[in-house]
Image: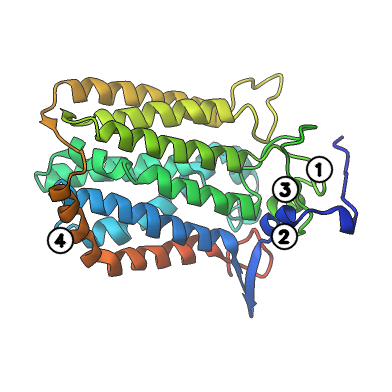
Amino acid sequence: MTENRTLPGKARKPFWDIHDRVVLARVGPITLVSFGLWAAIAWAIGGFVAVARLSQVGLLTESLAPFLSVGIPLLAILGSRLLEILVNLKAYAAAPTRKLPETGFAFQGALILCTLVLIAVAFQHSLPALRLLDALVLGLPLGHAFGRMGCLAYGCCHGRPTTSRLSIRYVDPCSKPVWKEGLSGVLLHPTQLYSAAGNVGLFLVLNGLAQLGPMREGMLAAAYLLLNSAGRFGMEFLRWPLATAGRRVKPFQWISMGLFLAGLVLLTWALASPVFDYALTAESARSAAGAVHFLGWLLCGSLVLFLGFGIHGRQVGRYFG
């Protein structure tokens, strides 16, 4: 049984107050949560970098921009929801009327579905699929880092209990560790912050590699898959829930291993692909600036994510209605 170690009011530090705020506003039966706002910010920032890179490499067209800016957020919501259901299928099958209204998302599901659809769209429009993926991963980790701040505010993707000084705790009754896990006041690993920092590092690594000069198309996307999946595999050792004697490898670790293998396949594909120069120069930066014309579409995508991830019912953790 986990010890409940709630801090006295005066002992609570400001940072804990900042991250332990779930509800933005309540309007009638609708609750707007901070996760949706962070998801919108993540798309506005990471999406703009990705779209700018697409403009730089000559793949951003008037016909493709609406799909990339709005269609991808919709697919991300769908894919992340579907994977969360599949991972917990037994629980959903046992009590569908109770489980289906609950909110729950998994980033890896969004990554898988969006990647498959993007490859299909590239082939349909006779676009270089690997170059398309390369351009997008140059912005994806930065957006993901901001998305993890939404996880921090909401309390999802939290770590296991710890005695480390590098820890956080939740007491807001609307935060997920409190209402779902009964971990009010318990010191937890701030895995959301670890993931955010890791994604910022990955963003810098990938963009640094892009500046090295010409490389095979698909190398950046393969590097993203390999590094991201390896990082997520390791992070699961610190994340809740704890591994059990009967299940030493968690479901998301299995998925991470599958994505790592996909990264190796993508790397093999990349080794036989044409060479392209992704480095930002004065000339290519002017091309990237063309993404400003599609800012309206990006903001529409942010609104989609805000509504898709941010609207709960009166009871936080359940869909409206």
Q: Residue at x 60, y 51 (%)?
A: 96
Q: Residue furthest bottom?
A: 28
Q: Which mark is residue 195?
A: none
Q: Is residue 76 visible?
A: yes
Q: Nearer the viewer, mark 2 or mark 1?
A: 1
What secondary structure is found at the residue carrying circle 3? helix
> Which residue has dot 3 on it?
177
Question: Alpha-carbon distance for marks 3 and 4?
Answer: 43 Å
User: What residue is shown with label 1?
Assistant: 186
Dot 3 alpha-carbon crowd within 10 angstroms: few under 14, some 14 to 19, many 20 or more: many
Residue to which mark 2 is pinned: 174
Q: Is residue 68 above or below residue 88?
A: below
Numbered label attached to residue 63: 4
| 1 or 3: mark nearer the eye | 1
- Give the SS element for disc 2: loop
Task: Kindly tell me whether residue 104 is visible in this rendering.
Answer: no
Figure quadrant of residue 5: top right
Residue 125 is left or right of residue 210, and the answer is left
Q: Where's residue 301, x and y in %? A: 36, 63
Q: CA distance from mark 1 to mark 4?
A: 50 Å
Query: In which quadrant of the rendered image does the C terminus lie?
Result: bottom right
Q: Are marks 1 and 3 in contact (CB under 8 Å)?
A: yes
Element class at badge 4 = loop
Q: Nearer the viewer, residue 106 or 191?
A: 191
Q: Which label's residue is closer to the chain start, 1 or 4?
A: 4
* Amino acid, disc 3: Pro
**Mark closer to the chain start, 2 or 1:** 2
Report the side of 41 relative to 270 (left or right). Answer: right
